[in-house]
Image: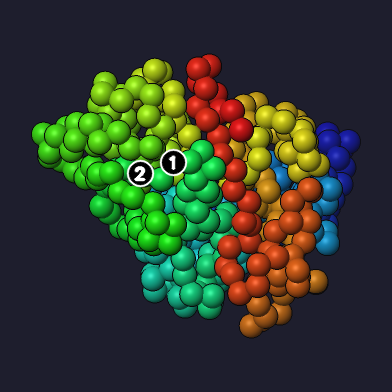
Amino acid sequence: MNLNLKRFLCKYLVALSLCLPLLANAAADAIVIGQAIDLSGPNADLGRDYVAGIKTYFDVLNAKGGINGRRIQYLVRDDRGQADLAVKAVTELIAQAHVSYLFGGVGDDVTRAVLDSAEFKRSGLTLYAPLAGADYQKDAKVLFWRPSYQQEIRHIFSHFDKLGINNVGIVYQESAATADAYRRLTDQMRESGIKLSGTVHLSNDQAKMRSETAQLASARPGFVIMIADTVSAGVFLKEFRKLAPQTFVAGLSLTNLTTLRQLAGVKAVEWTVFSQVVPNPNLGSSSIQLEHLNMMRKYRDEPVSALTLEGFTAAKSWTRLLPAGKRAPGQAEYTIPGGGFDIGGYTVGEAANSNHLSGYVDMALFNKANGLTY
């Protein structure tokens, strides 16, 4: 080895030894956020889009130097939409990755399983922004970004009430994931005085489902509302449209519209409407919508959706909830300013004694081009 090469190596090693502590300190000082979410299961489309929106905002934040000089380290684990895998992933994120914050996954059954898990309870963390809508006590360790099922259902009923429609058919799949939404639906029916035209129970009994679907179609309800997972909703819709091609059918915002269209068919999704908890993601009508469009174009090579906008907005809202400076042991993770705060044209956190930050609900119609008309 010649003398010049030896000198170069010595200088390189000295420089490296000086940099390593700085790199280690930077990594140790990162804000570590964990999330277990469905990336390959029945709601993978929802989960992947939600993660894309969250990650895009954190990329924007890190490009600006992070939060008070601390970069965001965002760790995502695939729970395949299964409660037991979600608990396992969250346990590992807490016990091994030592996350400081935890974002939620898809569905009420997964959310409830995480909240009830031993490691989560020991951690003292709050589950932030799960894609779920059940109501919990204000002191529960969960903070939703999106509105509750009750708010979505109330908005759907209000929409059809304006059209003079006062009778409804219900399509219900009984499960842990749909129980709260169904309770909110029956509560809203009692409150509004709307009449029940009939009920279709979705289960493995296909003959019973077809019989009840025929009875519901013959009752000619003003509209039908589906409380079911996307696969079961698609099976129902395909059958129902043979008998009632132009009856309005409504669903909640967590319906996987891509999967629904594939299962039911292009014609079957006409005359269907869905509650939406963010404004049109393809328009730049507000500063948050425009920022989302521009940053998704810059950081992600994929189309925008309601879920990418929701993830982006939830992540941006998260930064506004953090206490000033580095959080001390025992200090609350989140502080909601009195009266809420603006998040680029929309106010969130304004409802007192609520663990749902946003109350925004809109309606969107599946159009003939297989897009949504808001």
Q: To which residue does mark 1 refer?
A: 165
Rate crowding at label 1 as few (under 14), some (14 to 19) or many (20 or more) other CA atoms within 10 Å. some
| Quadrant hosting residue 181 | bottom left
Please name the residue shown 39% across and 17% down the image.
267
Between label 2 and label 1, give the one nearer the viewer: 1
Residue 138 position, x and y percent, is 54, 75
- On-image quarter of the C terminus: top right
Look at the picture and state if 184 lies above or below 326: above
**Callout 2–callout 1 Cβ contact below 8 Å:** yes
Q: Is residue 347 above or below residue 217?
A: below
Q: If the image is split into quadrants, where does the N terminus sit?
A: top right
Tell me which residue sits at (47%, 48%) in the image. 157
Amino acid type, callout 1: Ile
Q: Is residue 151 visible?
A: yes
- Where residue 78 sits: x, y (%)? 44, 46
Q: In the figure, residue 338 lies in which quadrant?
A: bottom right
Horizontal arrangement in the rendering, residue 349 relative to residue 275 (left or right): right
The amino acid on which the numbered mark 2 sits, given as a three-letter code, is: Val
Label 1 element class: loop
Secondary structure of the residue carrying tag 2 is strand
Q: Residue at x 68, y 29 (%)?
A: 282
Confirm whether residue 123 shows in the render: no
For the residue pair 194 and 146, the one nearer the viewer reads as 194
What's the distance in space between the residues labelled 2 and 1, CA to CA? 8 Å
Residue holding disc 2: 168
